[in-house]
Image (tube, rainbow, N blue to C red):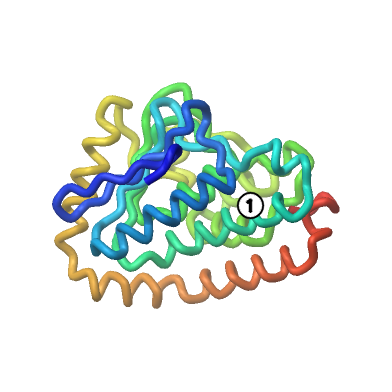
Amino acid sequence: MGTLVTYQLKDSVATITMDDGKVNVISLQMITELNAALDRAAADSAVVLLRGREGTFSAGFDLGTLSAGGDEAIEMVRGGFELSARLLSFPTPVVVACTGHAVAMGTFLLVAGDYRVGAAGPYRLAANEVAIGITMPYAAVEILRHRLTPAHFTRAVILAETFAPGDAVTAGFLDRVVEPARVHDVAMETAETLAKLDLRAHAATKLRARRHLLEALRAGIADEFGTPASLTSGNL
């Protein structure tokens, strides 16, 4: 697919792997390559298995671009949330293999999956915006509100609490935690099982079940990025 994302189709499952050799920052290039991979999966009518590299799913947005501000930063952040919306409305099931740390935008992509398998270990999952002085974006609030339990939503979004993989299941970030060596195999087994669903019914039901979320998410993206100043004002 490119230098950051690979695509492998096996039977009816498309494995999309993010690997930038470091912490899988969500850069403009990463977003572009992920969207290209999703285009292929859609054309192949394949179930998606999205995974990171060993020890890291994604550490979030490219901080260099974010710190520089301007149009490129706005395009990157908007593109990240539009990517989350795409995953939430993707016509086939999306399984996420959380191979380690997931932070900020990494968690927003994680929870956009339909089923999420995480690696046990000394990893952290956190929406840490408030901890680093950023008002949580509207789009992120809606994504997390949809997947987290009410009590954990407050702790994660407003208090920027960090969760270990086991606690992340209770909170709603993950559906299952297994040993790191088994993450890909379990995620693949799950994807193969989901491929047996009636995919037309799956797609229609997903859109019906998430209609209000997707409306709120798209409205949040439009409200947040209507003016270029929205990034530089301290409110992403």
96 left or right, relative to 8: right
Label 1 element class: helix
Residue depicted at 41% across the width and 23% down the height = 121
| Location of residue 119 with respect to 60 vertically, above or below | above
Image quadrant where residue 87 sits: bottom left
35 left or right, relative to 81: left
In front of the other: 29 or 123: 29
Q: How crowded is mark 1: few (under 14 residues within 10 Å), some or many (20 or more)?
A: many
| Image coordinates for residue 22, horizontal then vertical, percent | 51, 26
Q: Which residue sits furthest front?
A: 2
| Image coordinates for residue 99, horizontal then vertical, percent | 39, 33
Mark 1 lies on residue = 76
In front of the other: 91 or 76: 76
Disc count in the image? 1
94 left or right, relative to 132: left
Residue depicted at 58% across the width and 51% down the height = 153
| Location of residue 5 with respect to 122 vertically, above or below | below
| Location of residue 223 with respect to 188 vertically, above or below | below
223 left or right, relative to 207: right
In front of the other: 147 or 80: 80
| Image coordinates for residue 187, horizontal then vertical, percent | 26, 42
Tag 1: amino acid: Met
| Image coordinates for residue 142, horizontal then vertical, percent | 59, 62
